[in-house]
Amino acid sequence: MSSPATAACSPVRRTVENHHLGFQLAIRHGCYRAFYGRRRPKIERLMPRLTELFKVGVQDFAGVPLSKLALVRGAGQFLAAFARAKLGNRWLG
C-alpha cells in the first residue's frame, strides 16, 4: 500500500523521468552505482580507455550541449574496452 506522500509524488516522478533532467539523473545514478559498487575494480581498469566518454561527462556537468558524435565515440570506446577486457580474461584464464 502506498502512502499519501508517495501517491502525491508519483506524477512529479513521471514528469521528471520523461524530461531531459530525468534522463541525466538516471545516467548519473547508474554511473554512481557502477563506480562505487562491487564492479569498481573492473571499471577502474577500463577508465584510461574512455577519454571521449569523460569529455561528454565533463560537458554534461558543465551544462554544455552534448555532442552526439562524442556520445557515439564514447560508447564505441566503452564497447571496445569492455570487449577487450572480456576477451582478455577469457584467453588469460
Image (cartoon, rainbow, N blue to C red):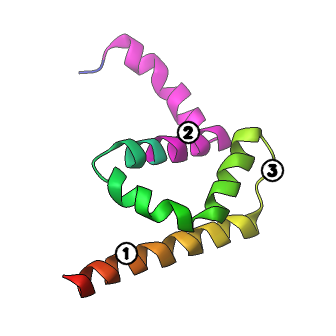
Is residue 21 positioned above or below 89 on the image?
A: above
Is residue 78 positioned above or below 35 on the image?
A: below
Residue 70: give x, y in percent of width and height: 72, 66
Report helix, strand or loop for mark 3. loop
Question: Residue, x 41% and y 47% (percent of image)?
Answer: 35
Among the two numbered marks 2 and 3 on one chain, the one whose residue lies closer to the N terminus? 2
Q: Nearer the viewer, residue 83 or 27?
A: 83
Among the two numbered marks 3 and 1 on one chain, the one whose residue lies closer to the N terminus? 3
The residue at which mark 2 appears reads as 25
Part of the protein shown in magenta = 3-30
Question: Residue, x 55% and y 26% (percent of image)?
Answer: 12
Residue 18: give x, y in percent of width and height: 59, 43
Among the two numbered marks 1 and 2 on one chain, the one whose residue lies closer to the N terminus? 2
Q: From this viewpoint, which residue is outermost toward the left?
A: 93
Question: Residue, x 67% and y 43% (percent of image)?
Answer: 20
- Amino acid type of disc 1? Ala
| Crowd tier of the residue under label 3, counting other residues whose Cα lies within 10 Å: few below 14, some 14–19, many 20 or above | few
- Marking on residue 65: 3
Say if the magenta span includes residue 14.
yes
Q: From this viewpoint, which residue is outermost toward the bottom?
A: 91
Residue 40: give x, y in percent of width and height: 35, 51
The residue at which mark 1 appears reads as 85
Q: Nearer the viewer, residue 41 or 69?
A: 41
Is residue 6 positioned above or below 58 on the image?
A: above
